Image (cartoon, helix red, strand yellow):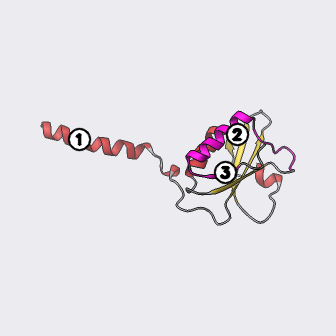
Amino acid sequence: MNRLICLIAVVMTWVIPLHACRADEKREEKPRFKGVELYSWKDKAGDWMFVLLDGTNRLKTEKEIKESPATLKGADELKKALARLAKGEQVSWSARDIKGLEFPPKEMRKAIQAAAKDAEIQLDAESVK
């Protein structure tokens, strides 16, 4: 009986951590062909919104950015999304001349940059002032 209890305890220590990670949190296997573009803005309620879109050779429209189904609410959701990107992914953060796009406050930017570094993501912070 003791052996059975020990066996169950050992198996549970293997199984429980496996279920703690959801399938949708799986990390991408390889970086995307043209990297990832990150955009940020405040919504009408004053919440910070972010979106990670596939990199392209063209400029995105405001509608394409702000109405993306991949929109993330808050820095915590963004940090989780960055951790799901492939190691070494190139992310370019832009707030170019589209009305309403802007960078969050300095402390939030630093926390996002630290999360990207921890996730081994190359976040282009050159344009983030």
- The image shows residue 109, relative to residue 122, as above or below, that is above
Secondary structure beneath label 1: helix
- The image shows residue 69, relative to residue 4, as above or below, that is below
- At x 47%, y 47%, the residue is 22
Q: Which residue is mark 3?
A: 123
- The reply to whether the C-beta atoms of the residues labelled 1 and 2 are less than 8 Å apart is no
What residue span does the magenta drawing correspond to?
98-124
Q: Which mark is residue 8?
A: 1
Spatial CA distance of label 1 from label 3 is: 44 Å
Q: Which mark is residue 33?
A: none
- At x 38%, y 43%, the residue is 17
- The reply to whether the C-beta atoms of the residues labelled 1 and 3 are less than 8 Å apart is no
Q: Closer to the camera: disc 1 or disc 2?
A: 2
Q: Is residue 121 magenta?
A: yes
Secondary structure beneath label 2: helix
Which residue extends farthest left?
A: 1
Mark 1 residue type: Ile
- At x 59%, y 47%, the residue is 117
